[in-house]
Amino acid sequence: MALKDINLEIQKLSTTDQYRLKEFFAKSLASYSASEPVFKEVSERKHKDGFTCSHCHSNNAVRFGKYNVRQRYRCKDCGKMFTDVTNTPLHRTHLPHKWSEFVQCMIEGYSLRKSAKLLGVHYVTLFYWRHKLLSAIKQMDFEHFEGIVEMDETYFLYSEKGKHEIEGRKARKRGGSSSQRGISKEQVCVLAARDRQKVTYSKVVGQGRIVKFRLEDAIGNKLSPTNALCTDAWRAFMTYAKEKGLEHYRFKSDGKERVRGVYHIQNMNNYHSRLKGWINRFNGVATKYLDHYLNWFQFLDQIRHRNDDTTVSRMIVESCLFSSETTYDKLRLSKFSK
């Protein structure tokens, strides 16, 4: 249809419908223009040392025309073509201009259905977007802790939320509760550690009580003899600190001694409290996705839950610096590794 034909059809619309159409185009164009600086920053950050191939990571790439308005490149080494967002959360996204609004909804902690209503995008699509973004954020890491490190574990009920046929037990509604008292295999252990510079690490380390070998696997490369470790009185922490040669301060759960000079675990306890309060809004999280949510909260805590253009842009840009090949089928068919 030619442009003049479109103009004729628009003139046939009622005044109300013409106004709605005007509002639609104004909002769409504003979304596109708002997303352009983000794409520009992604390009500059990814190619700061020259055009880098998204497939073989070679710097021997050249511009190779345009694809859907975006710059396309071709690698002279592997011969493959790519764009600035190939193998990133934005890869194969048909509505990239909606991502800024979507990330705003994520920072606010809106449900998928509420976000879908605000954005005009199906909630299943937003589920896929959410976990593509979180799988990339999960790759953000740091080398080591500095100084005093507070470390503690917390527990979440094992969940197979979203699964239609659950073996061995009845389905629970809205998270539910454990059938056993205390810590059992029905719960998954989340290890969290944080230094006084607020550098934080959190990870699911298995079901039931934490054991020593899981500590080394999870966090061993981030601790050194220069660190002073503050934990509760659980024996796995004591044995691990002794074998690692760490200065160790233990605080019993009876609360009689909460602080010993500058040493305590109150920052870690506060972090756990905020984490659990935040996760409760989801009415239960499938355990196989729990690591994604831990890293989501960790990022929100880092930006202090500020929902502005700077933090939205940062979340999108930094996630696009990591390779992500997450697909809907991979998410749906993934399983929790015990």
Image (cartoon, helix red, strand yellow):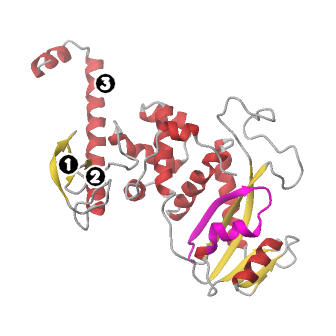
Q: Tell me if mark 1 has few (under 14), some (14-19) or many (20+) residues whose alpha carbon lies within 10 angstroms of its own.
A: some
Whole-percent x, y for residue 212 in the image: 75, 70
Whole-percent x, y for residue 106 in the image: 50, 47
The residue where tag 2 is placed is: 84
In the image, residue 195 sits, relative to residue 23, either above or below, namely below
- Please report contact status of discs 1 and 3: CB closer than 8 Å, yes or no: no
Residue 216 drawn in magenta: yes
The residue where tag 3 is placed is: 20
Whole-percent x, y for residue 137 in the image: 48, 56
In terms of depth relative to the viewer, which is nearer, 304 or 285?
285
259 on left or right of 301 = right
Whole-percent x, y for residue 86 in the image: 32, 48
Which residue is drawn at the image coordinates 50% and 32% (left, top)?
124
Say which of marks 1 and 3 sits in front: 1
| Distance from the alpha carbon under mark 3 to that under mark 2 | 34 Å
- Does label 2 or label 1 sit earlier along the sequence? 1
- Does label 3 or label 2 sit earlier along the sequence? 3
Residue 300 drawn in magenta: no
Q: Write down the region rendered in magenta.
A: 197-220
Which residue is drawn at the image coordinates 72% and 72% (left, top)?
266
Numbered disc 1: secondary structure: strand
- Please report contact status of discs 2 and 1: CB closer than 8 Å, yes or no: yes
